[in-house]
Structures are given as structure tokens and as C-alpha cells.
Amino acid sequence: MSVMVYSLRRATIATFFVSGVVFLLWLLPRILNPTPPDAEERERDKHWVDTSPNWVDRQACRWLGLCGLQHIRWDAPALMDSDEPSTLDELKSLALGLSTTWTFGEKRDVSDWEDAPSEKDRLGTSSASSAQILEEVPEYVLDNAPLVHLYSGENFWPSDMAEHVRHMKPYENGLLLNMSAPLDLGNLGIFNATVLLTSDDDVESRPAWLHSRAAVPAPYEDDGSEDDGDSHDSPRRPEDDTSWWDVDRDHPPRRIVPPRESTQRHHGLRRKRSMPNTQKPMGGAFSAGNEDKKPDPSGYSKAPAVLILVDKGAGIVDAFWFFFYSYNLGQTVFKIRFGNHVGDWEHCMVRFQNGIPRAMFLSEHAGGKAYLWKALEKRAQKNGKPARPVIYSAVGSHAMYASPGLHPYVLPFKLLKDITDKGPLWDPALNNYAFWYDYEVDRDEARNATVKDRTSLTPAAKNPDLPTSWFHFEGFWGDDIYPLSDPRQWRLFGEYHYVVGPLGPKAKWLDRRKVCQTEKCTIVDSIEAGKKSAWY
């Protein structure tokens, strides 16, 4: 009898232990996800699990969070790598246990000084007439443009979005859409939000366009110009004179500047000139005045950045610098990689008040952090211009940070980290596609179903022929999440090997009142404070 009771007790304990483990494995991804899925996403996930033909795999996925175990293998950054990681970034990632989590974005924040006053664009079309008044890029925007340290061991460098699109096909609900003309930036806006740009190539074959190695920035002759303060900046007003941090056209700054300082100091704010609106395809890297200079100037990359300027009224201008990469390589935990996706949009935003930079937002996965201008690291310029902010792009994920080093996020015990260092320094001011965006016009056009030619985005005067249709594409710039049946795919504890490609710049809340784009993002006054805060 005692033996039976003892056996029953052991069986009960074992049952409770196994049940507890199963429950924890089920609960863990839900606790750690900073942006929990909604009902629609849960339904999509159910369908995703059902794609596996293996019953055991489906049950292990539903109850234990272990999906596609039979597919797990080493995923090298480049095919020339051996079966074991050999580059510096991979050695670091294995030693530190890196991983990457990807979620949908959150709503933008709303509070006092972080807020500012708030289709089919075919090739060669005109908005209202044969000529259009195009605005110059203000000089102060370029004078204060960020310098970006890419990672020294990076494998996927900045890309030209025009080149990227040439390697993609539009798919909707898994079906290839028929087109009468090749896909390019001049006709991309004809597709709706359910369309995904899908690679012509198997990305695990690592085609050359995915790496974009030709876009590695030209090296600087020296590397000792950085400093941590504002000492090289031109004189500026105190930063607490108006509520510049929370404005749009309907909500101007709540205070005016002191009478002794004119509110009409434009610093070259809104110079315009009439240019013909004959948009042409982007046929490769567009260089802003550097086409004939040999060798390339320091920091020049053949991959253009995308500059979108948004006038929020009352002297507030937001300058969004978008950085595009054809591939996001996820990080690793115990040699298992998570978070790969085709296409990668990252950005930073500088808020100006009457031509004076006040703060900068840095995108980081589904969120990001914002810094007062004085908090950012600066690099002195030899041409007498203001010192420019220096920011850092993480290896693989390209998330943006204000300092080099390790950047843990989401997971406890520093299991999940990005890495940044002082690798090649990229100057996006030397080569960029520049535009002005009017969010009020965009709202009116969105309400008017008869509008065919979208005018809310216009090229800057320096590049009047650039197409704008690509901006109005609301779908995804990369492959869909590969199904569980795909041998390239797995998911462990809620983290996918391959996730869906990103949405484009229009989805980044360009009409935001605040500097930050997520509710929990706050503006910090030092780099150290930024290291201690989290966007989630």
C-alpha cells in the first residue's frame, strides 16, 4: 500500500511539474512581448501553425512554443562563412547570447513639449499644373545632419531602395500580381496595404544585392574628431522657451520666444523655386552634387539615404532621415538566429525650431528613444559648420543608438542585445533622396476617393525629377513571414527565424506631435540616461 501511495505521489508531482513547465513555456512569450498581438494577429498565427504538415510539430508549437525544431541549423551571415561563425560580430553574439524580437509598432506618445502643430502617383504625372513650386532643403538641416557609425563587422550595408525594388515582385494572399510594366518606385503606389514585395531570389543564397557591399562608406582620413558635448555648436537660445516638444499646425508652441529674439529668423527655411514636375525613375544611386568628384568624399555611400522634411508650423520643422537596407540579419542565442527579414527601414528624426536643433529621435526595433540635442555625441567639422551628432547602427538589425557598445532590450538578464561600434562613418548628407511632406494634404487626399495624383509628398528642389509613388505604398517592403512548413522557418518561445518585411516611411507617424513615436518613449538629457531607459 505504501509503495502504491509513494508511486502515486511521484506521479502527481511529475504531472504538476510537467504541467508547470508547459504553462511557463506557454506564458513566457506573452509576458516578454512588449506589444501583445490583437485578435487578427492571433488568427493569423493559428493559420501559420496549421501550415505544418507534421502533427507533432503543430502540437509542440501550440503548447510548448517550440515550432519547426527539425528546421533549426546555423544561419551564416554570408555564404563564404564556414559552418561556425568567424566574423567579429558573430563571435560577440555567441558569447553574449544575442537574439532579436520584432513586433508591430505602438501608438505615438502625447504630451507637452514633444508634440508639433498637426494616389496613385504615376510616373510623369503632374499634381495641379505642368509646373510645381518645389522647396529647397534648408541649409540648417544638412549642417546638423547625423553621422552614422555602421558596425565594423556588418554584412548587410545600406541599400538603394530603387535597386531593392528591382529584385522584388508584388504578391497578395500568396499570389503574384500581374503588371503591365516592371515594378519601380514610380508605380509602387498603385498597390494596397495587403501587398508584399517578395524577393525573386532565395535570400539564403545570399545574392549580392542583399549585401550591398559597394555601399560601404568611403573612409575618413582621421577618426579623432568626436566629443561628448555641445562645445562646437553655434550659439543658441535656451531650450525651455517654448513647448517645442509637443506641437503641430493645430497645436503651436504654447509660449513665444523673448521679444529681443526675432521669430522671423528663418536660416534659409523655406526657399522655393519653380521646377517642372517630370518625375523619372530612380535608376540607381542618386548623388547630391558628388557625381563627378573622385575619389568619393569621406563618409560618402553609394546608397542614398531618404530625407523627408515635415513643416509642423510656427517655425517647427521635423527632418526625418531614413536609412534603407535590403536585409535585416537577426541576432543569435546559442547559435540559433531570430528576426531575419527582407527589407529594413530605420530612421532618426531631428526637430528644429526656427532653424535650431532641439532633439533627435532614434528608431530601435518597434520603438526608440529621443535625446535632447545637447545630450548627443558630436563630431567637429573642419569647414566651420556646427558640430554634427554621431549615432550608431547595430550589427544586423541596424537599430539606431546614441553610443557604441552593448544594448540589451526586451528579454531579462541581458539575453537579448544589439551591438554597435565605431565602424565606417556614413554621412547621409552627401547622398540622399530629399522630399517635403504635407500631412494635412495627405489626410484630405485619403478622404477623397477620387484623388488619383497624390501631392502630399513633393521632391525637394535639388532633385525635382524623383518619383513619389513609392511613398504611398502601404504594404510591406519584404517577404511575408515564411510558413512553418518552410524548411527555412522556425519559432522558439514566440521568436521567429524569419519575420515579415517592414512598412515604409509613411507608416512612421511623420505627423507626430511629439519627438517620440511610442507612448513610453521619453526625451532624455544624457546618453547615460538613455542607456537606463527603455522604449517598451
Image (spheres, rainbow, N blue to C red):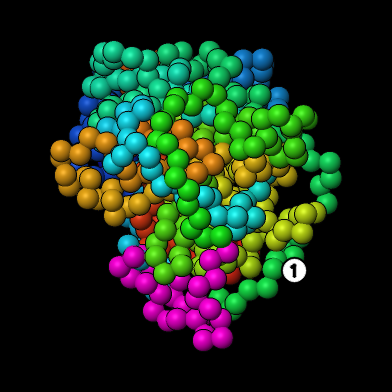
Residue at 50 percent of width and 55 percent of height: 271
Locate residue 10: give its quadrant.
top left
Percent position (x, y) of residue 99? Answer: 52, 38
Residue at 22 percent of width and 35 percent of height: 452
Residue at 49 percent of width and 18 percent of height: 203
Residue 306 part of the magenta-drawn span: no
Q: How many other residues sit within 10 Å of disc 1, few (<14), some (14-19) or many (≥20)? A: few
Above/below status of 245 relative to 152: below
Q: Amino acid at mark 1?
A: Ser
Above/below status of 67 relative to 401: above
Q: Is residue 429 left or right of residue 276?
A: right
Percent position (x, y) of residue 465? Answer: 46, 33
Region of the chain picked out in magenta, as a range: 240-267
Quadrant location of the N terminus in the rendered image: top left
Q: Is residue 54 left or right of residue 280?
A: left
Residue 266 part of the magenta-drawn span: yes
Most frequent secondary structure within the magenta stretch: loop
The residue that disc 1 covers is: 231
